[in-house]
Structures are given as structure tokens and as C-alpha cells.
Amino acid sequence: MRAIFILLIVGNIAFFGYHYFFMVEKEVVAGVQVGAARGSAGEGLQLLSEVVDPKGARARVKETRVIEGAVASDSSSGAELCTMIGPYGQLLQAEYAVERLVALGAPAHIIPIEIKEGEIYWVFLKPEVSEKEALRRLYELQKKNIESYVITKGELTNGISFGRFADYGEAEARSAEIKQQGYEVYIKMLPKMIQETWVVIDAGFAEKIDETVWSGLLMQESNLEKRQNFCLGVASQ
């Protein structure tokens, strides 16, 4: 009797184990088949950075086209062009050119234009706390026969200047001389600006002037040239 009972228990365990392991294996196989099917369809795993939103892509393309259209419209509309003659070395000659152009019915005026022409190097001592201290430092330097002056405006107000130099080597040599006297010297690079005088004729009038007139105006001085530039912002170039 005990043997039959034990046999039944062993049989039940075997039956349960068979069905359990058989079903798990079937699910695993099915999962592998589904994954293979997706892989063959080209829908494998992707990183988030690789996922592209079709709507977002269309939006970006549309935005780019709008920007390009705006740039194109600005360039196609085009600001008016003014005719310029210069640069004049003598203001009197520029005034003469304006008088002649105005007499011919072409509105003209003189505009000074600042042009960058290289760099200059400024040798200086950093600003003192007050004008009184700056003057005291200046007196101290002049007693040592060091040529210098107080800076009275700008970001270096109350500093001491030892000169500005077009060549960096000269500025460095001057700096070394002052350092030998026990002072902490600095060199600052600044843009070298020159001012040119130009005569500007309003847009639409230059075409009405005869070429012989232009030739006569350009012969007033050497190196004069005639050119066109946008009327807006000409003075700030």
C-alpha cells in the first residue's frame, strides 16, 4: 500500500515537471521567432538619439525655408546705393566738389569716415586711485627724467602713459626701460584709426551727372576714387 502511494506521488511530480518545462521552452522559442521576424522587417533596437520624429523633421525643414526666404527677400529688395568720391586730403577740395554737384542738381554732402589701419601699442602704468595720486606719480617719474603724462579720460583715467607706438618692438623696448626703474608696466594693443573725408551723392542722382564732370572731380586730387555704397550706415563704416 505504501509503495502504491509513493508511486502515485512520483508520477504526479513527473507529469507536472514535464508540462512546466515544455511550456517554458515553447514560450522562449515563440519569443525568438517574433524577435527574428521584427529583425527581418528592419525594426531593430534604436537609441533615443537615433529616433527621428517625422513631424519635427517637417517643421525644421519648413523653418529653414522661411529663414532662407527672408534672407532672399532682404537681398532682393536691396537698399539704395549712394555714390561716393574720396578720400579727400584737403577739406577745401571736398567742399568745392559739393558746391559743383549741388549746382548741377545732385544733393551731396561731406561725411567723415573712420577707417582701421593696423594697430598701435600703448605703454602705461595702471590707474591710480585718484587724480592727486596720479599727479604724485607723474612728479616722481619726471624727477627720474622719465617722459610721461597723466591719462585724463577713458578706462585708463589717472593712469600714466609712456607713449603709443606703431611697432610692438618699440613698445616692448620702452616697457623694458620703465621696468628697470622698478615700475610695473603694461602694454595695450589698440586699433589705429584714421579719418577719411568723402563726398556722398544721394541715390538716383549720380546717373544724371555727365562723365566729363566726374572726370573733372576725380582730377582735383591724386588717389581720388568714385564708388558706390549702401546709403544707410555709410557714415559708420
Image: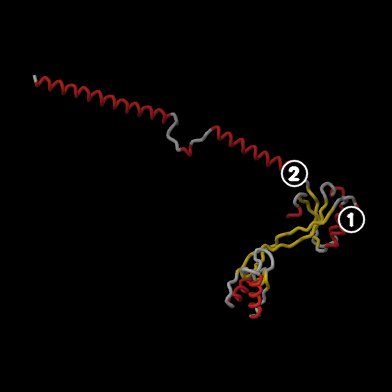
Taking the spot 41% from the left edge, 29% from the top edge, the residue there is: 38
Judging depth in this view, the residue of 232 and 37 nearest the camera is 232
> Disc 2 or 1, which lies upstream in sequence?
2
Question: Alpha-carbon neighbours of circle 2 within 10 Å: few (<14), some, or many (≥20)?
Answer: few
SS assignment at label 2 = loop
Question: Alpha-carbon neighbours of circle 1 within 10 Å: few (<14), some, or many (≥20)?
Answer: some
Taking the spot 80% from the left edge, 50% from the top edge, the residue there is: 82
Q: Residue 142's x, y, as percent?
A: 66, 78
Question: In the shown orientation, is residue 27 left or right of residue 169?
Answer: left
Q: Residue 31's x, y, as percent?
A: 35, 28
Q: Amino acid at mark 1?
A: Arg
Taking the spot 15% from the left edge, 20% from the top edge, the residue there is: 8
Question: In the shown orientation, is residue 123 left or right of residue 199?
Answer: left
Judging depth in this view, the residue of 58 and 144 nearest the camera is 144
Question: In the shown orientation, is residue 184 left or right of residue 27?
Answer: right
Taking the spot 61% from the left edge, 71% from the top edge, the residue there is: 172
Q: Residue 33's x, y, as percent?
A: 36, 27
Judging depth in this view, the residue of 205 and 137 nearest the camera is 137
Residue at the outermost left position: 1
Q: Amino acid at mark 2?
A: Gly
Question: Where 31 falls versus 96 (above or below)?
Answer: above
Residue 90: quarter of image = bottom right
Question: Where 179 falls versus 49 (above or below)?
Answer: below
SS assignment at label 1 = helix
Q: Are marks 2 and 1 in contact (CB under 8 Å)?
A: no
Calculate the distance from the C-alpha at mark 2 to the C-alpha at mark 1: 29 Å
Q: Using the image, tell me which numbered label, if any, was put on residue 78.
A: 2
Q: Residue 132's x, y, as percent?
A: 65, 72
Question: Where 79 falls versus 161 (above or below)?
Answer: above
Quickly name the residue at label 1: 100
